[in-house]
Amino acid sequence: RGLRCPALAERSVSTPRPVDVARLGLGAAAVARPGLFLRLARGRVGRGERVTVRILGARYLVQSGAGLTLTQPWGRPWAGPWVRDADAAIDLVHAATMVALATIAPTHRRLALLSAATAIGFAAADLRERIR
């Protein structure tokens, strides 16, 4: 049995939430390769569409960065169930806006619905997660 310093043990890195890691990966891929997502959705692959996918990817990067930070020991004073709930709420609002976009912009329907489905999947993963 070795001696343990409580102050150092408290600062150890905790395991990241899988949903934050998934958001991080998707966000990085969307920023780096927006054309891939546009081809998957069989949507237009114009400059405006690429910029939009990059912006949505950046949103996922920011959201996952906040989630990853708040679940670490240095973020614990602010962490709690509200982080998971806020992540789910952000994704559900995103899904709702994408469904609205699919309704009013038929040329972007497939990509908007893919984005909505992804956001709903992330929200469901957040809400199923046990609070640590």
Image (cartoon, rainbow, N blue to C red):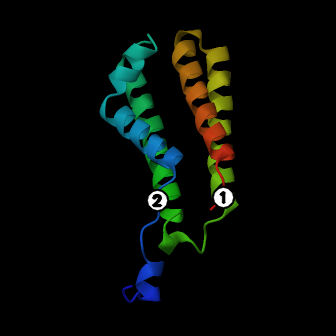
Quadrant location, the N terminus: bottom left
Instruction: Specify few, some or many for label 2: CA neighbours under 10 Å numbering under 14, 14-19, or 20 or more.
Output: few
Q: Position of residue 127 (x, y in %)?
A: 68, 45
Residue drawn at 64 percent across, 49 percent down: 129
Nearest to the observer: residue 58 or residue 21: 21
Q: Are marks 1 and 2 in contact (CB under 8 Å)?
A: no
Nearest to the observer: residue 74 or residue 100: 74
Check disc 1 and give the amino acid type: Ile
**Height in image: 30 above or below 126?**
above
Residue drawn at 62 percent across, 62 percent down: 132
Residue drawn at 64 percent across, 31 percent down: 95
Nearest to the observer: residue 3 or residue 94: 3
Q: Position of residue 46 (x, y in %)?
A: 36, 17
Q: Position of residue 116 (x, y in %)?
A: 60, 27
Q: Which residue is mark 1?
A: 131
**Height in image: 92 above or below 105?**
below
Q: Secondary structure at mark 1?
A: loop
Residue drawn at 54 percent across, 26 percent down: 115
